[in-house]
Image (spheres, grey):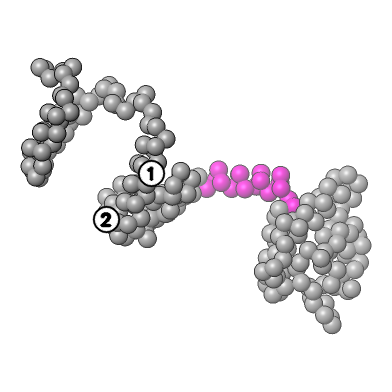
Amino acid sequence: MGIVGFKHSEETKKKLSELAKGRPSPRKGCVLSDETKKKLSLAAMGRSSWIKGKNHSEETKLKLSLVRQKTLFTDPERLCTKCNKIKSREEFFVVKKLRTPSLSSWCKDCYRKLARDWHRKNKERQAKKFIEYKKANPEKFTVYYSEKRANRLKACVPWADKKKISLYYTIAKLYTEIYGEQYHVDHIVPLQGKNVCGLHVEYNLQILPAIENMKKGNRL
């Protein structure tokens, strides 16, 4: 081509820009046939992207990020690239792992369907992983079941420190491993006492040998 390697002057660029203003794009409204799409696809195979190997400056990255964020969070609707349906912005997840928050390219329904299909196909694998994890982390499941029981008895409060509660069960596990004797986490004031009921909070917990805990029962 005669234009390859040729650079326009700034003056010529301005003139061309003025001439192009208001001129409709020659491809506007043009729909490519399937045959043409295949030809273009084959022609593009093996061709490296023009942006490959190029790095944007921090200033350009910030500009692109701001434009992208403005577009994503101001447009009331968005196209799902999975089901090709236009849906409202609320139907997409907010992705916060990037430099600036953005919306997912798939809608929530498509992600949920993908998750359901994956779990349906990998039931045995998931069950095996769950059993292995449960064996490796018994104290975590003890914390979970204890909280579940306390919830059922309405003994949980929102201001309880869950990290400190979890620490009691971790220490009980360590005592069991060190001394070779089973240790339990006990509620000082029982959750189902005769005259008074305690709460599932960190200052109502103590670590006892399993035998002593079973002897104590629901007594203070």
Q: Quadrant for residue 33, please give it.
A: top left
Going by the numbered disc 1, the residue's amino acid type is Ser
According to the picture, the residue beneath numbered tag 1 turns out to be 65
Provide residue 1's location: percent of width, then percent of height: 11, 17
Q: Quadrant of the C terminus?
A: bottom right
Q: Quadrant for residue 19, please give it.
A: top left
Judged from the image, the secondary structure of the residue bearing numbered disc 1 is helix
Tell whether 58 sits left or right of 131.
left
Q: Which of marks 1 and 2 precedes in the sequence?
A: 1
Nearer to us in this view, 26 or 184: 26
According to the picture, the residue beneath numbered tag 2 turns out to be 86
Going by the numbered disc 2, the residue's amino acid type is Ile
Rendered residue at 29%/26% (across/down): 49
Instruction: Point out the stretch of residues depicted in magenta.
Output: 123-139
Farthest residue to the front: give it: 11
Residue 110 seen anywhere in this rendered image of the structure? no
Rendered residue at 72%/73% (across/down): 155
